[in-house]
Image: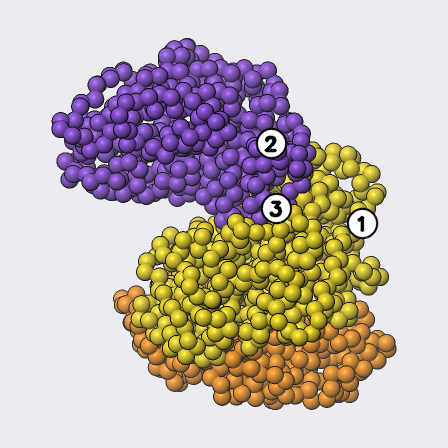
Chain colours: A purple, B yellow, C orange
Amino acid sequence: MQTTFSPEQLRDPQVALSESIVRKCVHCGFCTATCPTYVTLGNELDSPRGRIYLIKDMLENGRDADKQVVTHIDRCLSCLACTTTCPSGVDYMHLIDHARAHIQETYKRPFIDRLIRTVLANVLPYPNRFRAAVAFARLGRPFAPFFDKFEALKPLGAMLRLAPKSLPKQTIRAPKKPSGEALARVVILEGCAQPVLKPSINTATRDLLSRLNIEVVTPKGEGCCGALVHHMGREHDSLEAARRNVDAWLAVAGKLDAIIITASGCGTTIKDYGHMLRLDPDYAEKAAKVSALAKDITEFLVTLELPKPSINPEMRVAYHSACSMQHGQKITEAPKILLKGAGFEVVEPREGHLCCGSAGTYNILQPDISAQLLARKVKNLKVTKADVIATGNIGCITQIARAADVPIVHTIELLNWAYGGDQPAL
Amino acid sequence: MSAEVFSPTPFNPIAFLAPRTNVLARRSTIIADLSDLLPKEGLVSEPRKLVPFETDGFTAYRNVPLAVALPETTAQVAAVLKYCHNQGVPVIPRGAGTSLCGGAIPQQDAVVIGLSKMNRILDISYEDRCARVQAGVTNIAISDAVSADGFFYAPDPSSQLACTIGGNIAMNSGGAHCLKYGVTTNNLLGVKLVTIDGEILEIGGDMLDSGGLDLLGLVCGSEGQLGIVTEATVRLLAKPLGQRPVMFGFDSPEGASECVSAIIATGVIPVAIEFMDKPAIQICEAFAKAGYPLDVEALLIIEVEGSDAEMADQLAMIVKIAQAHNVKVIKESQSATEAALIWKGRKSAFGATGRIADYICMDGTVPLSKLSYVLRETTKIVANYGLRVANVFHAGDGNMHPLILYNVNDPIEAEKAEACGMDLLRLCVDAGGCLTGEHGVGIEKRDLMLHQFTQIDLDQQMRARAAFDADWLLNPSKVFPLEGRAARAGKTE
Amino acid sequence: MMFTPDTEAAAAAFIGDCAKQRSPVEIIGNGTKRGIGKTATAQTTLSSSALSGIVGYTPSEMVISAKTGTPLELIKASLAENNQELAFDPIDYCGLLKSNGKPTIGAVAAANLSGPRRFVIGAARDALLGVRFVNGQGEIVKNGGRVMKNVTGLDLVKLMAGSWGTLGFLTEVTFKVLPLAQTETTLALLGLEDAAGIAALASAMATHCEVTGAAHVPEIVNAALLNGQFKGPGATFLRIQGSAQSVPSRLAFLQQRFANMESMVVEEYASRQLWQQIRDVHPFQHDYRPVWRVSMAPSRGHEMVDVLRRHAGLAAFYDWQGGLIWLRMEAGAEAELVRKTIAALGGGHATLIRADDTTKHTTPVFQVQTPAIAALSARVRAAFDPAGIFNPGKMG
């Protein structure tokens, strides 16, 4: 597509990058077809092509973000289905990231919106704060319908509803050191919200890895990957999180074969650290190294020779591919190969490319669209007549569990069970 | 290179009708009135939000419209049309905005009516083998909805993932498989058409033959000039037992195109014969990784259908013909996944071209016997302009798609590309073909219409058009050359 | 007075004069279908019969162009020499209408004729690629062309097809042709009542077998087919065409699918004969009673016939998977009853193909349109023939 940036504008590396991204777009419209918000709302402005145009227009004219543009950028789930579809190779992810940072810098949100975003950014990435907040939300839940009455307060209602009624007990088992020489040496990203909501995921991961003779080391100083704030356009916070984790992981003594991630949302971001920090001379190289080490747990497992499964589950599993898994990281086959290899019957729902509406904080910030996507997802899942749903992202698990009539677990929980670990709660 | 001296065609940017100043002056009133006719979020009128609607798949031309209406029902479409008719406001229908000829490009004094919110499949009848759908349903959504039950909707334009059935009807879209199954008009049973005065007409239905004049046939392919289709009844077909695309690589484009003519002449009609030249093969392979042979100058993707035995039978005949034309490589798809990739690559060809350059895509059709000649001339013409070309097209029905590669940010090259495109279209007409096989005239080919038609031919079409829209409010800058139009199009009695 | 121009220019000049004088013209080819529709109220008749000859035929491009007065049989013969055919297999009305003469290729277009394959391959309109005609002002207009895919400008080709000479005088038509099927065979299912027969047709059409003929003929009618060899309450026909290699396997598949029914196979020669009889409405050729041609959704045609039977004597049979119903009324045409019944069952289009003159002049022959469509059609007609001189009243 034609662009009209001035040479001066293009001296800003962010603008130059965005320009090169927009230049690849041929406006063919393929992306609209697989965009969850476009198929839900039917407005080009809520499609990747429309947003690319809004962003291009805003950046070309050197304008601050305004409500007209922000409304539609905010509705983007960052599910990246468009990047899977796009034949032209438009790097939509980095364009929308730039737009979000630009909004954060140049646009003053209404007070309530600002408040909610500040709270989310300061609570979710911190397990202890999050745990406390969940307890608090339980008290507030009866007020949810009240908040729903006001457009601006809907996110509060959504937040209260999303908070789990109870939290699982934290049982942290120290990983067993493999006997003899380990096949590989890895770090598992501990995460922020996931260990609060579903500690069993990382427990299962650790159990399985140690049975497979993989050494799991625990780094010091690791924190949230930064994805949550990154998607809110809080560039400073997300880069801080990235630097902190880069430091933590590279400080691990000895050879590290992989950084294992059990939440695909985090995986997408960590694999992007190299890009996020490319302009930081102190971190560019280190971040790239970390990104290269980052592996989704299924991406890692599929490279290993696994033993024969120790159970015969006779179970029909609907595999729900998280957007960050299939579109963000383009991992589509590994989880299915692993589940099938472990003896499960694997089925895929129709419209598997569509987001479930979780998308980080999206189900809080855009509750109406999120609810429609959830309903559509659950309907498609139901048709599969599966006994259980498996997925690789905590966000999807929390979201889908609210509406599905069969249990939803992390893929690794099923795999761990099949290979001799505990049976997940089904 | 030909001996004659090359003189490039002078470049004339395509003009739109001058905006009606009396409409522009009433902008805010019109917007206020329209918003009363539409649901919440059904009207886009803020300046920033209108910009993304300024163009379609033909991005060289752009006009920000006055407003965009996104109705949810036929009644709302009718209300908006009636209002625009009464107020003398031009209307631009828009489906998914994938037109490659500028069919959905607005003008400043126009209200765009986008059908994107009307995206439901209303009714499927297997016993009558038809489906009734809203106009904003995508082409592929119809096949997706009936696929599990063994049916499909046949026309398959390459943009089928995104393009809407309403847009397909407006452009009478084709696709790779229309060699066997025909284009949109052959697979359309009925439409609900809203005329410019807001009247809702049912044309055709779920039966094959309708009495009276074939208005359905006239509406199909009328490029949004006769009314707005809000619902369509389309035919469904039972899926074949098997389908197998086979790739035939040749040392020269001529070899491949002569092979196509020979296949058709023998009376073997495959379901699809697609052609790609070397640049196109490379572009598509980079995106789809379908295993296209990269060491050939031209590739034919030929698809056969039926039982294994039937496919083998047909293939054997085709292989024999191909061998007589010095085929270099023959590659069969080994699995359904591979077959899907072969088609994915082909159908993404235009978009994938975006990875290496900007492009404009031409759409002339030529008689099969002229394929080889037209390909040769195309190369010459494009080279004379100092540009590059990738050819990827429906060879079985002679529907060329040269993609002229250029840099849109370079104004001189952009002008060259457009002028070159016009020359290629003239070439097709002069070879006994036509300006457009499936993309439509839009604004892109409008000013070449007199190369294919006489003024009398066009006047007759314009009078038929005026029978639907006497005031020329519907998509008015498209299809017919602007010059002298008002005097000729005259209202009918 | 009859004028038979031998050039397009002569026709144009003649029509130009008629337009100036606002003098109505009846347009015909060889007049074999003159009996369909109302007799045009014109003193002058313009016939295309002297505009004869194939203008261009390139078998390797599957396209034939001919002047409109060219006899259809000549076109068919030329095509057959090259193993090709008009795949839509136009009906020959001579038997039903008891008319003499050679139907022309122009009339195939002007009346949008088709045959049993219409429901899979389309009608004349679908194969018609290009036309030349003289409009009501005496101007020579061309539309479409000689290529398979063409969306340049408004598709007047479709509009001309089936316009029964009310929009213009066709002078040249170009059709897409297809290779002749190597062979064909028909599976006849025996003993089915209408509903079951139509259901069997739908079931066959949902298979991959590419059935190219799907007709159901009730007992009362089927005695007229192939010398009455199909006994029992009804005969349901499924035709398969294709290569000698593929036809037997598809037949076997269908036999398997309908293994629980009594059936017989109609071999190639007889099959061709059978479908020609179905195409030309052979069962109703031997009398003069009124005949309706009804187009409806396939699943509803037999319901319509069922209702009608309760109120009037009739014989009927079905083609196009049940979507084309040929109705012969035992006494009067019963136009009101027929049309009301069709409307009540979801709608359709009924054309009174055969009737005596009195009936034709007191009942609308073609389906009555809604006022909005009728008004629009009138405006379209005026765009071609502003003086209203072509076949006045023909489609009324």
Give the label on residue B18, or none: 1
Q: Chain of mark 1?
A: B
Q: Nearer the viewer, mark 3 or mark 2?
A: 2
Where is residue B51 shown, x and y percent of the image? 67, 39
The residue lying at 20 percent from left, 33 percent from top is A183
Q: Pointer 1: residues within 10 angstroms few (<14), some, or many (20+)?
A: few
Q: Are marks 3 and 2 on the same chain?
A: yes
Q: Is residue B307 left or right of residue C313?
A: left
Tell me the residue that label 3 is attached to.
Answer: A1
Instruction: Please tell me whether mark 2 sits on a helix, a strand or a loop.
Output: loop
Which amino acid type is shown beneath numbered disc 2?
Answer: Asp
Q: Which residue is most to the front?
A: A281
Tell me the residue that label 2 is attached to.
Answer: A12
- Contact? badges 3 and 1 (CB < 8 Å): no
Which amino acid type is shown beneath numbered disc 3?
Answer: Met
The residue lying at 80 percent from left, 42 percent from top is B23
Q: Nearer the viewer, residue A175 or A139?
A: A175
Mark 3 or 2 closer to N-term? 3
Q: CA distance from mark 1 to mark 2?
A: 39 Å
The residue lying at 39 percent from left, 71 percent from top is B328
Residue B386, picture quadrant: bottom right
